[in-house]
Image (spheres, helix red, strand yellow):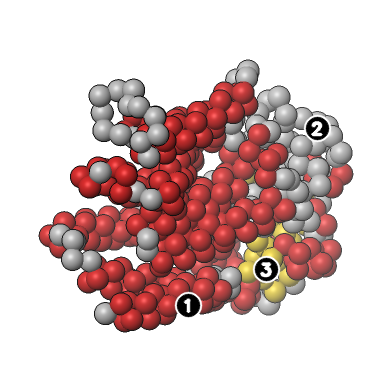
Amino acid sequence: MDLIINLVYIVAAISFVVGLKMMSKPSAARLGNFISALGMLSAVVVTLFSKGIVDYQWIALGLLIGTVIGIFAARLVAMTKMPEMVALFNGFGGIASLLVGWAVFHYSLGAGAQSLDSLQTVTIVLSVIIGGVTFTGSLVAFLKLSEIIGGSPVLFPGQHIVNGLLLAGMAGSGVWFGLEIAGMIPLVFALPAGYVPFLTVVLLSFIYGVLFVIPIGGADMPVVISLLNSFSGLAACAAGFVIQNNILIVSGALVGASGIILTNIMCKAMNRSISNVLFSGFGSSSVAHGKAAEGTVQPISVEDAYLILEAAGSVVFVPGYGLAVAQAQHVTRELGELLEQNGADVSYAIHPVAGRMPGHMNVLLAEANVPYDQLVEMEAINTQMPTVDVCIVVGANDVVNPAAHEDETSPIYGMPIINADQARTVFVLKRSMATGFAGITNPLFFRKNTRMLFGDAKATIQSLVSEFKGS
């Protein structure tokens, strides 16, 4: 039986790696996700059959509840709420790892606390710390993304000192926990050995998770989502050591490593370090500066925009979070198809940090059945942009802001952007002249080749579609 279990674990681990590789391409991402999920299902099934202590009634109940939640989440959560759902699921992964560590510790008391070896003691503390930070940090990210609380950074004097004290407190409580478990120090309270320091670690990790995320503004949410995803993987890996399960260690390590790699990619796409993201409070009034953009905006009517598009030989859409808010992905794809029928070459420029989670625009456009080969990465589209007749910016702001390479005083200076300003004509679809997540003005709006199409993006694009169909 052990041989079969280990063979299934090996196959599952391979499926995780293959699935991750396939997710690097939009055309294969869905199949890669299915392969990884199938591998995890097989690992869970053989694990349940290998453990005689499992109560299958509770397993069946959990499976039923999880299935119902998963179906509702997949079917009912709008694409605009996908970042919030990802943040929440990261938090669930964190709290699951914490509870696994807690369960192992609690049940060890029946056999005497000394039944825990040194490795289990250390990994229990790690699973609790990482899981607790991931849980409350993800909840704060969820609340920020849902706009239940403000998305701006929350800063206060001595914040770094408080965070340092919390880290020291968790480390100290972890040592206290280990010493009590080993019987090397007397009990301070009338509770089983290790319980007081254990609960202290739990409490401090929850507090630290909140304080870890509240200083981070909306502009950095893609990085936060990636980092918390990595934390959830590391917590699972620690939980795997706690229960001595190889496949949980492997899967957790893969998620943790891929999350760190993705976080690094997100940081490079913003020309910032991870420490700058976590500790700078980017987006607050104290750091959002730069030269004020000056000039006169040039609005354009839908009718005049149609005439320009009708004559265009090449059109590039640059989607941003405003596209998701307006639920304009389907009409955008429809307009793209009409432009193609009119003889235009159509593509969609994807910035790595557009939206509020990694891959947000890819997911949004895939949901609208935009062909994968029309999704073009930033580096590739920038080489073509000077030859583009019309660039349509739909709800994007900071990722097309020329201040990133023109204004050395701007907080986004040096950040790679989509060079929409180099197109022959630029249409910017916005509700107003409000700033983006970074809180800075965009000089693109005042360029001679830019025309502003004010209003709801979905309604505006629908009007352009109507113009094409009525012509």
Q: Where is residue 226 shown, x and y percent of the image?
A: 56, 52
Q: Which residue is mark 2?
A: 290
* Sequence-wise first label, 2 or 1: 1
Q: Nearer the viewer, residue 115 or 144?
A: 115
Q: Residue furthest front?
A: 184
Q: Amino acid at mark 2?
A: Gly
Q: Amino acid at mark 3?
A: Val
Q: Nearer the viewer, residue 155 or 143?
A: 155
Q: Which residue is mark 3?
A: 376
* Sequence-wise first label, 3 or 1: 1
461 relative position to 415: left or right: left
The alpha-carbon separation of the residues under discs 2 and 1 comes to 49 Å
* Sequence-wise first label, 3 or 2: 2
- If the image is split into quadrants, where does the N terminus sit? bottom left
User: How many numbered dots are placed on residues in this image?
Assistant: 3
Q: Nearer the viewer, residue 48 or 148?
A: 48
Is residue 9 shown above or below 146? Answer: below
